Image: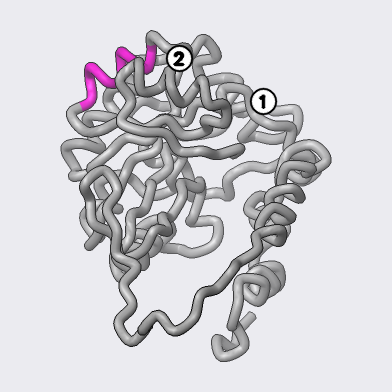
Amino acid sequence: MAVDKSELVNVFDYEAAAREILPKLAYDYYRSGANDEITLHENHTAYERIKLKPRVLRDISKRDLTTTILGQTVSMPILVVPTAFHCLAHPEGEVATARAAGKAGTIMMLSTLSTSSIEDVMSEATGLIWFQLYVYKDREATLSLVQRAESAGCTAIALTVDAQVWGRRERDIKNRFRLPKGLSIKNLMPTGKEQFPKEQADSGLAAYVTWQFDQSLCWKDVEWLCAKAKVPVLLKGVLHPEDARLAIDHGAAGVIVSNH
């Protein structure tokens, strides 16, 4: 189905267009939350509650949103967060996303669960790329991801700390979510962990997380990662102030406040 780009003027228009274009399995995966989607609803509501108190007569003839994050210059204080499986929506997947982020002058965080490899993305990237990391039960495979990201030119590691147990995403369960033929978790191909388990009761992704992610992840592992990494490590998924303090105490360069 063709989309008239002149009709896409806000994010809600893009969501409506995606609903028309994407297969139900892909659309539901991208737009859904866990359980009754209360957190998803609250996130939307929180943005709607934001009130602005504009000031006037401030000479806005020269406007500049440029800022720095970890000493890295970006065109605006908006980053592309890590999301998985971009090839569900576009044949070039994360490679195309990296090009767009570079053109916008901001940072893209590349997901461990990317359908394009770190190396393929970095070969096309024109801007800064951070690598989002999940910790696998296989620590050698985990460390290999970090080393590959660093060698390819990623400038930071964003360790996800709130997803060792997957949320019960009911839309994925109903759709029996799985990757279509020809797609895989490219970054894990060298380890043989690039496909969902063959036997799955409902969501293939939930089964994969249970099968592969290390649920014993704790603060000593943050110290381990910070000691091994040659680039700054941030913790993604922090909500409690005390956890933010502990993150810094254990070597993290910063935190990403996120409820996943």
Kindly indicate the quadrant of the structure image that contains residue 258: top right
Residue 121: x, y in percent? 30, 53
Q: Quadrant of the C terminus?
A: top right
Q: What amino acid type is highlighted by mark number 2?
A: Lys
- Residue farthest front in this picture: 57
Q: Is residue 171 above or below residue 205?
A: below
Measure the alpha-carbon separation of dots 2 and 1. Answer: 19 Å
The label on residue 181 is none
Which residue occupies 62% across, 88% down? Answer: 7
Give the colour scheme of this rendering.
Answer: one colour
Q: Is residue 72 left or right of residue 9?
A: left
Which residue occupies 33% across, 77% down? Answer: 63
Q: Is residue 17 above or below residue 112?
A: below
Q: Nearer the viewer, residue 224 or 202?
A: 224
Residue 187: say if magenta.
Answer: no
Residue 139: x, y in percent? 36, 15
Q: Which residue is mark 1?
A: 199
Q: Which residue is mark 2?
A: 137
Q: What amino acid type is highlighted by mark number 1?
A: Glu
Q: Is residue 89 left or right of residue 60?
A: right
Q: Secondary structure at mark 2?
A: loop
Residue 141: x, y in percent? 34, 22
The answer to whether one can see residue 181 in this image is: yes
